[in-house]
Image (cartoon, rainbow, N blue to C red):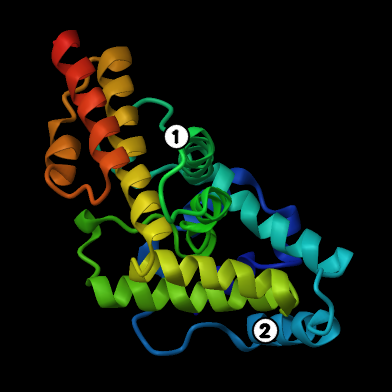
Amino acid sequence: MSRVLCKSLIPSLLSSSSSSISAQLRFKHFPTSSSSSSPRVSRMATEASSSSSSSASPSPSSAIDFLTLCHRLKTTKREGWVRRGVNNPESIADHMYRMGVMALIAADLPGVDRDKCVKMAIVHDIAEAIVGDITPADGVPKDEKSRRERAALEDMCKLLGGGSRAKEISDLWMEYEENSSLEAKVVKDFDKVEMILQALEYENEQGKDLEEFFQSTAGKFQTEVGKAWASEVASRRKKSN
């Protein structure tokens, strides 16, 4: 892990300014080697894990360290909107929050655990607290992006102290990443629906042409609820033009 990231982690993170945190999250700071963390980060994570791995819940210290790191999700802007010059673009946390609400309000679906979908929605981008929002425009291969995010997730779970809560976060993230369940397919559709709904809102509010975001999701919805909600967004966009 780079010197920039090492300097940013707990406890240094506690005194970092929002602007410096945002600057540190750019993916270009992260190496492509197999090493996932500095000795300092690994030591912190190991100590946290060994101190509370036998407990279902993290210690107060581990919980606050973890939540402080998650603060980055609130301050890091979604890179796709930044690249398109959107004013005051949403953060990663903004995106995940509305996905969680989507899962909460969606109709019951056969074989789908709604509560699991809510949880999955609020953790699916959690590794971006460390690696930042890597987009296709960044030119990072898919396998490399996944490697960075998996390494970041592992360090975050260790920082939380291990135990059942960390395992639940890890399992939910992996299930989403691998698209290995009905819940993952639903949440992946919500990810796309939330993006195009946000694109429509930016088009209406700021006069932007964000057609590329609609094109990138066309034909990629896996569930009936995803297809129905995407169709509704498309219909409203057509009426607004």
Which of pointers 2 and 1 indicates the residue nearer the eye? 1
Residue at left 81%, top 69%? 58
Residue at left 84%, top 78%? 55
Compare residues 125 and 184 and report the one nearer the observer: 184
Figure quadrant of residue 32: bottom left
Residue at left 40%, top 90%? 34
Relative placement, left or right, of 75 versus 57 is left
Figure quadrant of residue 206: top left
- Per the rendering, the mark at residue 90 is 1
Position of residue 201 measured from the top left corner of the image (x, y, whole percent)? 33, 21
| Disc 1: CA contacts within 10 A as few (<14), some (14-19) or many (>=20) | some
Residue at left 65%, top 47%? 17
Residue 2 visible (yes or no): no
Q: What amino acid is found at the position of numbered circle 2 in the picture?
A: Arg
Label located before the other in sequence (2 or 1): 2
| Disc 2: CA contacts within 10 A as few (<14), some (14-19) or many (>=20) | few
**Element at badge 1?**
loop
The quadrant the C terminus occupies is top left
